[in-house]
Image (cartoon, rainbow, N blue to C red):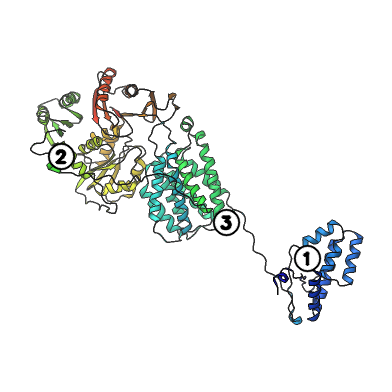
Amino acid sequence: MSEEMNKQQPIDAVEKPGTEAKPVAVKTVTSASAATKKTSTAKKTGASKSKTTTQKMAKSAAEAAAKTAESAKKALKIVAESKTVASIKSAVTETKNAAVAKIEEYSKGKSKIKKTTNAKNAKPKTVAKPKRTKKKNSGGIKYLGGMLLMKMARGGAMLLRSNAEEVNKLNVFPVPDGDTGDNMRMTIESGIAAIENMDSDNLAEVMRTLSHGMLLGARGNSGVILSQFFAGTAKGLEGKDQADPATFGHALEMGVKQAYASVMTPTEGTVLTVARESVEYAVSRVTPESTIRTLFADLVKEMHASLERTPEILAVLKEADVVDSGGAGLLYIMDGFNRVLNGEEIVDTSAAVSASAPAPAVSAVLFDAFGSDSEMTYGYCTELLVRLQSKKTDVHAFDVDALKVFLASIGDSVVAFQTDSIVKIHVHTFTPEKVLAHCREFGEFLTVKIENMSLQHTSQLEDAKPEPAEEKPESAPASKKYGVVAVCIGEGIEQLYREFGTDEIVQGGQTQNPSTNDFLDAFAKVPAEHIFVFPNNGNILMAAQQAAELYDKATIHVIPSKNIGTGYVALSTADFSEEDPEAIALGMTEAMKRVTAGYISPSIRDAEINGVQIKKGDTIGIVEKQIVVSETDRMAAACGLVKKIMEGDKFMLTVFRGKDADAAEQEALNAAISDICPDAEVYFMDGGQEIYPYIFVAE
């Protein structure tokens, strides 16, 4: 049969036994000769049923088309004459437009009856129903599996990576220390690394591996919250090979609950709110007809709307004219999920550099660093525990302040405090013998440690050499009761912390938040039963706490130090001769309450915060998350900050000088502080920190 004949087969009606024939579609025959040929063929095969069927179909079509008496008469005449379908159509076209429209409606597609050349087997057959047309945007994805989730996660990580710097800029304070975008990026990229070599379509398995990788790689508070959101979602998918919209929506609800539970005091108007509101909205719209695409479309839609509302919930965001940075990071991730789900290929447009790239190795020569021709450059780090003797002094009336004045006259980096009859002393000096002689005037030594800081400095550089990434340290067997891990950055600050007994330094600080795994690695290197941890940054605290919960080889005590200054004071007051570790932790925490810390930094944009007018390029002073001063001159800003933090009963000020400050400026600042606080004890230390030219610690 020719292609043309295939296109022009006549249509027969399907008649069920005991029922009248119903109207069916009429297919137009464009050639009269073709119609005649088909009729002739039917007669030759003795298809009497076909003739009867054609008559009934013609009658039904005519009755349906008849709108006037004239059209009805013509239709009946056609039936009597047993005309072909072509004749029927020719006659009907002479009727009114309404009748024509009716026939054309039928002609669009009812059942066809194929005829065979064998009249005996020429029985009508019904045609299978056409497949339902898929609803637009449904994508037919009723279930989410592991392979698709991996693709979506990679897309989410890629989209955030491309926009991480934009998220960083959503900083409440106009200072160059925003790192939310980087923290969330590195957190989810740790999860992506964990699933990199997986070849599984099991949804629960993939989500569990992804969330565990994020848990270990979590950086900053935003990264920890993100990892907890995914961990809760993974719990909701346990035992699920795949998930429909309702199941995945429930898992997301569990993710929100776990994210909230991870924060001691949840704050609305943050990433928590954005996650909760978007999940609630998406889940509320799930129906039996929903697909994974519609679920994520609703999720991302409401996530964007919720993010835009954050400044109305959190006043500090409105004042700074920004939306919540953590919420923005979550939106980029979920939008990446959604785009991949809809077939979009996401291209990395960022120029981000991995923060985990190893630093250049530094060679060390240990004892050879101080030879027979060397000159003493750094002095001696001198630490003592002195037991006051009642036969030499009045133990209860002992004047620690007078001791500090003496120590400051022969050295720097002075720390001295009394606990009952024990005095702890730390000083950098070129004449440690004078310290020993002076202390024996009122007590006797319990411990003495004097170290050449030239050797100490070299040894620290050697310790700082990065280990190969694949070599994970084994947990050291406990050989002592107490150990210390601290987060800090800056050569001078690191040295100071080591001098106070820190076993392991975790490199990090503002804009360089260490991960949960970084803490776990540090814990494993400390051979102690109890390890005290100093995060020294409010944005690192949650990662330290998360690591403490995961580590089981020692008891971890996280001291909530939120900056280098408070951590320094807490560590310097620690009495590790105390048998009760909880008492030690409590003592350090109480010591921090007596400290006020602040810092200065350049402003990167115009703003008005806390009633302080700020111009781009100004130097601003920040105390306890409050901007207290903004000046065009850096020295003026530093002096203004000092006035604020030295109010009340503060009498001692320690100043950490950063990389961006020089000795000449330090000398001028020291003179200015002397005018502001003539009775205060002021100590400058070369901290070497970045971003902040000066960090001030008032006690």
The one nearer the camera, 274 or 162, is 162
Asked if residue 389 shows in the view, the reply is: no
Q: Position of residue 401 (x, y in %)?
A: 20, 24
Q: Mark 1 falls on what kind of element? A: loop
Dividing the picture into quadrants, the one containing residue 642 is top left
Q: Which mark is residue 338?
A: none
Asked if residue 298 lies left or right of residue 658, the reply is: right
Q: Which mark is residue 455?
A: 2
Q: Mark 3 falls on what kind of element? A: loop
Kindly identify which residue carries mark 1: 28
Disc nearer the start of the sequence (1/2): 1
Kindly identify which residue carries mark 3: 139
Amino acid beneath label 2:
Leu
Cα separation, mark 3 vs mark 1, equals: 36 Å
Q: Position of residue 316 (x, y in %)?
A: 46, 31
Amino acid beneath label 3:
Gly
Work out whether 354 lies above or below 667.
Answer: below
Disc nearer the start of the sequence (3/1): 1
Cα separation, mark 2 vs mark 3, equals: 67 Å
Q: How many numbered marks does the figure carry?
A: 3
Q: Position of residue 110 (x, y in %)?
A: 74, 65
Q: Mark 2 falls on what kind of element? A: helix
Amino acid beneath label 1:
Thr
Disc nearer the start of the sequence (2/3): 3
Work out whether 270 lies above or below 298.
Answer: above
Question: Which of the two discs, 3 and 1, sits closer to the camera?
Answer: 1
Q: Are marks 1 and 2 in contact (CB under 8 Å)?
A: no
The one nearer the camera, 539 or 693, is 693
Q: Quadrant of the N terminus?
A: bottom right
